[in-house]
Amino acid sequence: MMLKEKTHALISSNRVEGTAVYGREDNHIGSVKELLIEKRGGQVQDVIVSVGGFLGLGSDLHSLPWSKLDYDVDLGGYKLDVTEEELKNAPRFAENDAERPYDRDYQTSVYEYWTVTPYW
């Protein structure tokens, strides 16, 4: 059964993954790779954004607090109110370090860098 496109507050995670991410000046800076959901509360807390590279190869991965992104209907993607320089200097990790975003020290550095109160 095909679901009709509806306007509501919920969205499936598979529709978020792959969505474009834009910077402060509406420039395309990457795409959503995955969402990190708090086990007990069920809330999306972090988003992994793939930046740079070609077809996902050679790209940097950034774990960002979900609250840093806003969906922009006109752009058809998520807007991140940061400059390219700010993102370049942000904590990041490589594809082969997939456990990194779950490390509390790494998470602490991310939340401190983006000046967001941690969810824990």
Image (spheres, rainbow, N blue to C red):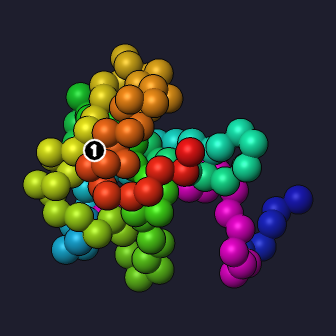
Q: Residue furthest left?
A: 85
Of residue 72 and residue 54, the one placed in the foreground of this image is 72
Q: In the displayed image of the protein, which residue is found farthest to the top?
A: 96
Residue range of the region highlighted in magenta in the rendering: 6-22
Q: Secondary structure at mark 1?
A: strand
Q: Which residue is mark 1?
A: 51
- Above or below, 51 against 23 in this view is above
Residue 15 among those drawn in magenta:
yes
When asked about the image quadrant of residue 40, the answer is top right
To which quarter of the image does residue 85 belong? bottom left
Percent x, y of residue 98: 44, 22
Question: For the N terminus, which image quadrant?
Answer: bottom right
Q: Is residue 8 visible?
A: yes
User: What crowding class fits label 1: few (fewer than 14 Cα within 10 Å), some (14-19), or many (20 or more)?
Assistant: many
Q: At which x and y percent is residue 54?
A: 25, 37
**Residue 112: x and y, percent?**
31, 48
Image vertical order of residue 64 relative to residue 109, above or below: below
Identified at 30% across, 29% down, the residue is 93
Residue 18 in view in this figure:
no
Image quarter (top left, top right, bottom left or bottom right) of the C terminus: top right
Q: What's the amino acid at mark 1?
A: Val
